[in-house]
Image (spheres, helix red, strand yellow):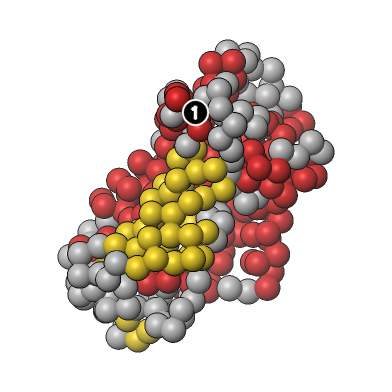
Amino acid sequence: MTQNFKILFLFTFWVQSYSFAHTQTTDSTQIEADSATKSHVYPKRLAIVGGVTVFTYGYVYYYMKTQAWWKENPVDFHFDGGRDKKYARGHDKMGHFFLGSFVSDRMGALLRWSGVEENKAALYGALWSSATQFIVEVKDGYAPTYGFSWRDATWGSLGCFYPYLKSKSRFFANTEVKFSYFPREYGPIIDPTVRKRTATWHDDYINQTYWFSVNIKNNVRALKDTKFPDWLNLAVGASLDQYTDGFGQGNRQWYLALDIDTKRLFKPKKLFWKTVVNSMVNIKIPAPAIQFGRNVPFKFYPIYY
């Protein structure tokens, strides 16, 4: 990844987190009130959103064409030939779900910041993110070492509509999908197409963990009027062990861990600190965890990330 691309990514992430903080309430149980808000579009803000989106997508496309796998000489359009079933044992599908949810969530926040009504913003964000996932898959269909994958497109689209589901469901409004990454002693899996070890963190599925985090107090009625901390979550995570080789070998590892809802823990008042806190929404905070799974040793971690 080039330095310019890193700077652009951080800038775009900050703009999206700003809009997310500007429109996000700390108490996510107020979905009925939020959904009743009417649209009052601000043309200047909408123009900024459009400009940032077009510029970001254009630069990402340029990066993919010059630095990533799209730079390879294209071949005729084709579907995935079976590699997708074995590669990373399906763990990459969680990545597609997470990315689809992330883009949808941030696009929805940008639209809400522009004045679009809550439900419409969530729906438009989901549709935009889903279209992005589909277009990427179509482009992959012309890459010699890849191919159009219905599995990737499906899981990505499911993730895209997760934020929309959160705007409709009290339970899901108090949940979050999260990501953690820590390079351990074992390295990335071997890419079965190029026969070499992958070097980038986004392909290092062995050291990635994806989480589904549930707020305890807001989803357990018996705790509603108690002093139980409203920032404490329970999260279920999934990763792969070091025996994963890209050819279908390896084991799935599952985790049960405590988690922190940073919005409820810090409750920032100023917009700047709201932006900082909301940029951490999808990052799993290190916490005690239990590891389990088939052919995986049961293990307790005082701190797992």
Judging depth in this view, the residue of 244 and 175 nearest the camera is: 175
Rendering coords of residue 67 (x, y %):
52, 74
Residue at the extreme front:
226
Taking the spot 71% from the left edge, 56% from the top edge, the residue there is 11
Rendering coords of residue 45 (x, y %):
74, 33
Q: Is residue 63 visible?
A: yes
Tell how many labels.
1
Residue type highlighted by circle 1: Leu
Taking the spot 23% from the left edge, 73% from the top edge, the residue there is 250
Rendering coords of residue 59 (x, y %):
61, 59
Q: Looking at the rendering, which quadrant does residue 35 occupy?
A: top right
In the picture, measured across the screen, residue 84 lies left or right of residue 28, that is left
Judging depth in this view, the residue of 33 and 104 nearest the camera is: 33
Q: Looking at the rendering, which quadrant does residue 210 occupy?
A: bottom left
At mark 1, the secondary structure is helix
Per the image, the residue denoted by label 1 is: 223
Q: Is residue 163 visible?
A: no
Reply above or below: 80 against 133: below
Residue at the extreme bottom:
196
The crowding category of the residue bearing disc 1, from other C-alpha atoms within 10 Å (few below 14, some 14 to 19, many at least 20), is some
Rendering coords of residue 192 (x, y %):
27, 79
Reply above or below: 296 against 159: below
Reply above or below: 260 against 144: above
Q: Looking at the rendering, which quadrant does residue 21 occupy?
A: top right
Taking the spot 20% from the left edge, 70% from the top edge, the residue there is 295
Taking the spot 79% from the left edge, 36% from the top edge, the residue there is 269
Q: Quadrant of the N terminus?
A: bottom right
Reply above or below: 199 against 227: below
